[in-house]
Amino acid sequence: MRILLVGGTGLIGSAIHAKLSAEGHDCILVSRHPAAARDRRHITLDITQATDPSKWKGLLSGVDAVINAAGALQGQDMQGVHVAGSAALYAACESAGVRRVILFSAIGSNVDAPSAFSRSKRDGEAALMARDLDWVVLRPSVVVGRPAYGGSALLRGLAALPVLPVMPETAAIQPVHLDDVVETVLFFLQPGAPSRIALDLAGPRQIAFSDAVALFRAWLRWRPAYRLHLPSWLASAAYRAGDVAQVLGWRTPINATAQAEMRRGAAGDPEPWRQMTGLRPRDLEVALAREPASVQERWFARLYALKPLIFGVFGLFWIATGIISLSAGWNIGMSLLREGGLQENAAALTVTAGALADIAIGLAILWRPLSRYGLWAALIISLSYAVIGTALVPRLWADPLGPMLKIWPVIMLNLVAMAIREDR
């Protein structure tokens, strides 16, 4: 079959694409992320800008089925992705005669929609169901598998903490394995498969979120951790911190939307799904046991929890150095430059320029859209400081406080931040 896969670079979309390609299907990926060089099967398209059916018409030529796995989170245009852009796609499918459309929604959004995320998912379902199409709506719970993103990555990250935080006011979840989700898509792409149906994709067992974290901790071969029941004010502070991170462009599963969704939980009835497809959803503990954790998994879990601290501390470090240079450290900086042979005006200009550069670098590191450039600038200026400091005041290498020696740990942290910047 020729299949248009919208959201084909996400956690679920990537797994579907890999399986369909292995089965011999011709997949055309649509994603807002730039396509790899010479990849003619990957079309870069911002769904929020494709709200007219004509935008989709050319992509549907010769297509047998459409899978919509596109998703937006808090801080993104959820209405544009889940409703407006998707509705235009469904209208184009109806006009082009592409009958089979599979939509990935969210479990529970048809029952209770406590956040803008679940409300937009619910409205996106309604937009598809209103069309004369052979539609299928799949509502997965927390999806787990070898890849990790969003909630599944959060489970690993929390498992790496020295204590197991138990968030207040959280309902049960029913984790579903990624492979079961992919097999379900293959089932509904078969000729004569049922249509005009909505199914919950939920695992066979309801568990508390903290118990799921404990299962991942055991899978990573770490001893059980002490369960720390967080007070409501501390949990709320964590969610608000996530909101701040999203304002700065970082994607985090901890935010106000997550707080509302976790209160509702992610549970459903897997029996209709099992009866219709014949699949037996895998239990989380059994699924984890079948794929032992590697050292790479342990690295990821530990770095996941450290990543926000690395970027937060590193960005604030550069801002602080700039502020100190313009205030309490002004005289120290001036004396060092005068010792290196610079005149008063030149020294003042150098200290000021360096301090402002440090502040700009720190702000760039904290704001994700510019973080890549901020890290490169930090690396270059750190090396420049080492060279210039050696040339002007070589005695700093023998200073007991080690101002020159400490540049190298800073550079190493810079390289670590560059290595883990990517989200997916």
Image: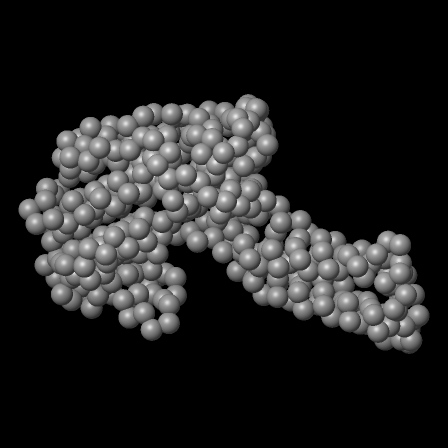
Percent x, y for residue 137? 21, 42
Q: Please tell me which residue is depicted at 89% across the width and 54% down the height of the picture.
A: 400
The x and y percentages for residue 307 are 57, 48
Q: Seen in the image, is 88 located left or right of residue 403? A: left
Image spot of residue 313 (x, y percent): 67, 49
Quarter location, residue 199: top left
Query: Residue 306's image quarter?
Result: top right
Q: Residue at x 80, y 72 (%)?
A: 388
Q: Residue 183 placed where, x, y %? A: 22, 44
Is residue 317 or residue 24 the one in the foreground?
24
Give 24 or 103, whichever is nearer the viewer: 24
Extreme residue toward the left, this view: 192
Residue 26 located left or right of residue 195:
right
Residue 6: in sight, yes or no? yes
- Specify whether 253 is left or right of 402: left
On screen, residue 55 above or below 277: below
Look at 15% across and 49% down and name the residue there: 189
Q: Nearer the viewer, residue 81 or 315?
A: 315
Observer able to see residue 252: no
At x 81% / y 61%, what residue is drawn? 404
Front-lying residue, 316 or 419: 419
Q: What is the quadrant of residue 390 in the picture?
A: bottom right
Quarter holding the N terminus is bottom left
Q: Is residue 363 above or below residue 214?
A: below
